[in-house]
Image (cartoon, rainbow, N blue to C red):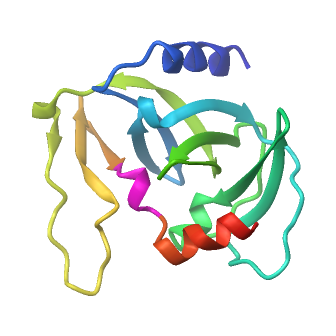
């Protein structure tokens, strides 16, 4: 939990060229630090009926009802049991607050525009508009997400109901 405290402190002091990095499976992802309100340990939430499978439910965050989604399921990755490393990123997405379950939080990193390459071109059937680019840090690549584009407008409307 000390690591979360340090990362939450970095988030509150964050700048535009900083990214909160986290893992899903073997891959490293990043979101702009300015989009992250806080990171909390995994906790139980209230299930909501008739929502897509990646929407896990809602949680009470200091009196606010926050929808929670599992990013693994949203990205069509294999389900994984939640463990002691599983965290919920509290994000601002298109002026809404949502929680996103990820396997583990890594760090807050600085990436200059020169460290970020364009998203590779894939066939027209593969949606990659929610990927801002590929960040290079030492020998590893970080998939930089445009968190405002992860969910479609109809999916966001569902979260408003949840």
Q: Is residue 16 left or right of residue 101?
A: left
Q: Considering depth in this image, is 79 or 70 the residue closer to the camera?
A: 70
Q: Return the x and y of residue 54 as percentages of the image width and height.
A: 66, 70
Q: Quadrant of residue 89?
A: top right
- The quadrant of the rendering that contains the C terminus is bottom right
Q: Does the rendering let one see residue 79?
A: no
Q: Is residue 151 left or right of residue 158?
A: left
The answer to if 62 sits in the magenta stretch is: no
Q: Return the x and y of residue 20 as percentages of the image width and height.
A: 45, 32
Reply above or below: 76 against 46: below
Q: Return the x and y of residue 9 as percentages of the image width and height.
A: 57, 13
Q: Is residue 104 left or right of residue 16?
A: right
Number of numbered discs visible in the structure rendering:
0
- The quadrant of the rendering that contains the N terminus is top right
Residue found 19% across the figure and 75% down from its top: 122
Q: Return the x and y of residue 67 as percentages of the image width and height.
A: 72, 56
The answer to if 149 sits in the magenta stretch is: yes
Residue found 19% across the figure and 83% down from its top: 123
Residue found 21% across the figure and 85% down from its top: 124
Q: Does the rendering let one see residue 67?
A: yes
Reply above or below: 37 against 93: above
Residue found 34% across the figure and 20% down from its top: 15
Residue at the left extreme of this rendering: 114
Reply above or below: 64 against 10: below
Q: Considering depth in this image, is 138 or 132 the residue closer to the camera?
A: 132
Q: Considering depth in this image, is 101 or 95 the residue closer to the camera?
A: 95
Task: Specify the segment rendered in magenta.
Answer: 145-150
Q: Is residue 94 left or right of residue 90?
A: left
């Amino acid at each position: 939990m000390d690591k979360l405290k340090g990362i939450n402190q970095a988030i509150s002091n964050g700048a535009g060229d900083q990214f909160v990095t986290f893992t899903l499976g073997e891959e490293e992802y990043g979101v702009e630090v300015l989009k992250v309100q806080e990171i909390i340990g995994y906790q139980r939430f209230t299930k909501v009926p008739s929502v897509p499978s990646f929407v896990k439910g809602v949680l009470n965050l200091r009196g606010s009802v926050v929808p929670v989604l599992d990013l693994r399921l949203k990205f069509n990755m294999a389900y994984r049991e939640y463990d002691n490393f599983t965290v919920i990123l509290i994000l601002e997405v298109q002026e809404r607050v949502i929680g996103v379950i990820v396997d583990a939080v890594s760090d807050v990193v600085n990436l200059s525009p020169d460290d970020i390459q364009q998203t590779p071109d894939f066939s027209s059937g593969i949606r990659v508009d929610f990927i801002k680019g590929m960040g290079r840090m030492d020998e590893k690549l970080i998939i930089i997400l445009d968190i405002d584009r992860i969910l479609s407008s109809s999916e966001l409307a569902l979260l408003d109901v949840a």
